[in-house]
Image (cartoon, grey):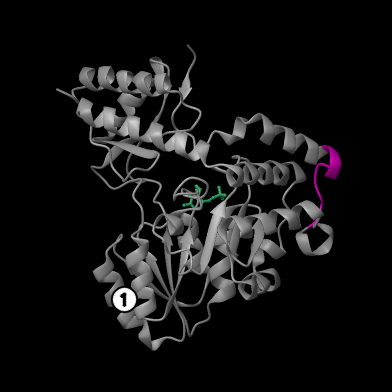
Amino acid sequence: AGILNFCANNYLGLSSHPEVIRAGVEALEQFGAGLSSVRFICGTQSIHKDLEEKISRFHQREDAILYASCFDANAGIFEALLTPEDAVLSDELNHASIIDGIRLCKANKYRYRHMDMQDLEAKLQEAQKHRLRLVATDGAFSMDGDIAPLQEICQLAEKYEALVFIDECHATGFLGPNGRGTDELFGVMDKVTIINSTLGKALGGAAGGYTTGPKPLVDLLRQRSRPYLFSNSLPPAVVGCASKALDLLMESNAIAQSMAAKTQRFRSKMTAAGFTISGQDHPICPVMLGDARLASAMADDMLSRGIYVIGFSYPVVPKGKARIRVQISAVHSDEDIDRCVEAFTEVGRKHGALP
Ligand code: PLP
């Protein structure tokens, strides 16, 4: 029956969607293979402007700016926005690209314990002495499938006059009633100031990232953000694919709903089988195993049963918290999900992870 991929960030299955592929081919034919330029010299075509407009409409923000990746968007924002008079408050489990982006800026740095609102409040109090405060968090955390408590974060931000930045790489396209992301899920779309996200996961899976938010911020990034100024423009085929992916998501939420139903099926069947699945209703479903060798041996055995999953252990996750990270996609059928659960049950029994 072939091998089923359960470890891609292809949450909505759009990387193999026929309309997305066709849009990429058409963009390639119409606009060429690439621009051989950064955006501000001769690297801007109408499709780049159209995609930026579409991204800001999708997120209901004023403007958007494209990057070669979300890693670049994260690398480029903090340095451009924050000065030594400012402060950035960052969740300790934020993605490496946020950590690197913060390293590049000269603002005062505060790291709060993972999703710990008491600690964030204490750090916000300490940071009152600075001119501007920015709270930075992943919307959904990729190792645990847990979701930042954005309502509480936004309340604290309001109380202590801070801006909120979220990285929505594991949320854009499928979290919230219309797939807009974590801010929509928690009803705080008007309270989150800046969103960075990727085109390389749910939105077609090719490459590319962006910042969306207030127009003056995007204008500032176009003037000052180094990965935007000094790196090549996104290739037309990539832009065409992402643009079509957004069209599909703005037309209907059916794909995201189908993925959510499959996530629910996987999580409840695995829990009933006796496994511990970390996170909250998210298609990232970490099967918690503890021991690194167990996670790796089980992942190998899963592959021999036709299920492609990967074991994660230290230093990617904390010591003693090894896991197999399963990721659900809208393209998995119910039968695929059941096959995956059956394989986990067999392999788990063989290795003593289940009674
Ligand atoms: N932020 C988060 C939370 C991610 O998971 C990733 C990708 O792994 C990135 C940023 C970087 O995204 P990109 O692949 O577009 O550079």
Residues packed near mark 1 inside 10 Å, few (<14), some (14 to 19) or many (20 plus):
some
User: Could you tell whether 276 is left or right of 52 in the image?
Assistant: left
| Residue 149 coordinates in the image, percent (x, y) | 33, 60
User: Could you tell whether 120 is left or right of 89 in the image?
Assistant: left
Residue at the spot x=56%, y=75% of the render?
A: 81
Label 1, on which residue?
123
| Quarter of the C terminus within the rendering | top left
Question: Overall secondary structure of the magenta stretch?
Answer: loop
| Residue 106 coordinates in the image, percent (x, y) | 50, 77
| Residue 127 coordinates in the image, percent (x, y) | 36, 81
Residue 11: tell me if it is visible: no
Magenta residues, start to end = 29-37
Residue 96: tell me if it is visible: yes
Q: Is residue 320 magenta?
A: no
Q: Quadrant of residue 45?
A: bottom right
Q: Quadrant of residue 299?
A: top left
Residue at the spot x=34%, y=80% of the render?
A: 159
